[in-house]
Image (tube, rainbow, N blue to C red):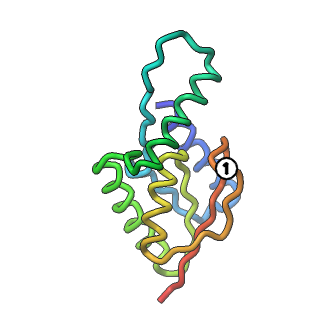
Amino acid sequence: MGAAVAAIALALLFTLFAPQRQIRVSGLLRESPLAIPYWPTHLPFSAWGIVIHLAWMYRILRGTDADAADRARAAATAEWLTAIVADGSTAVVVTHGVFRRLLANQLYARGWATRNRRGGYRHWSAWSFSRSVS
């Protein structure tokens, strides 16, 4: 629940800079969970982060990083965003890296291009996408 509250707070902050813009909140943008791998001993918190992300990268390489439901949700989100910006407007989307990666793949498949990927998957990183309006 904390991530959802933070995303809504960030969206409300954007209204200070663009009060005329509509804020839309969608469950489509919820995070995809990362599996917690089995580890036989206790680890410090930072080590768990490394282990979890190494396991995620391994699943990406194997093509098993997301289930069918998350992939379908990413496809639905890409369609939703494409409809929102069909008039040439701009959208700001707040989500976590795991789902952002799935969404990016769906946007690429629909002809979108990356304009900027600042920060990779670090906290508060930002990726910019654009598409040609037909």
Q: Residue at x 58, y 50 (%)?
A: 11
Q: Amino acid at mark 1?
A: Ser
Q: Residue at x 66, y 43 (%)?
A: 122
Q: How many marks?
A: 1
Considering every residue shown, the one lying at the far bottom of the view is 134
Q: Above or below — where is 62 with respect to 76?
A: above
Q: Residue at x 37, y 46 (%)?
A: 64
Q: Position of residue 85 (x, y in %)?
A: 49, 74
Left-right relation of 80 to 122: left
Left-right relation of 64 to 130: left
Q: Nearer the viewer, residue 32 or 79?
A: 32
Which residue bears the numbered disc 1? 125
Callout 1: SS: loop
Q: Position of residue 6 (x, y in %)?
A: 57, 38
Considering every residue shown, the one lying at the far top of the view is 42
Label 1 crowd bin: few (<14), some (14–19), many (20+), radius 10 Å: few
Q: Nearer the viewer, residue 13 or 20?
A: 13
Q: Above or below — where is 3 with respect to 96?
A: above
Q: Position of residue 128 (x, y in %)?
A: 63, 65
Q: Residue at x 63, y 59 (%)?
A: 127
Q: Above or below — where is 66 with respect to 78?
A: above
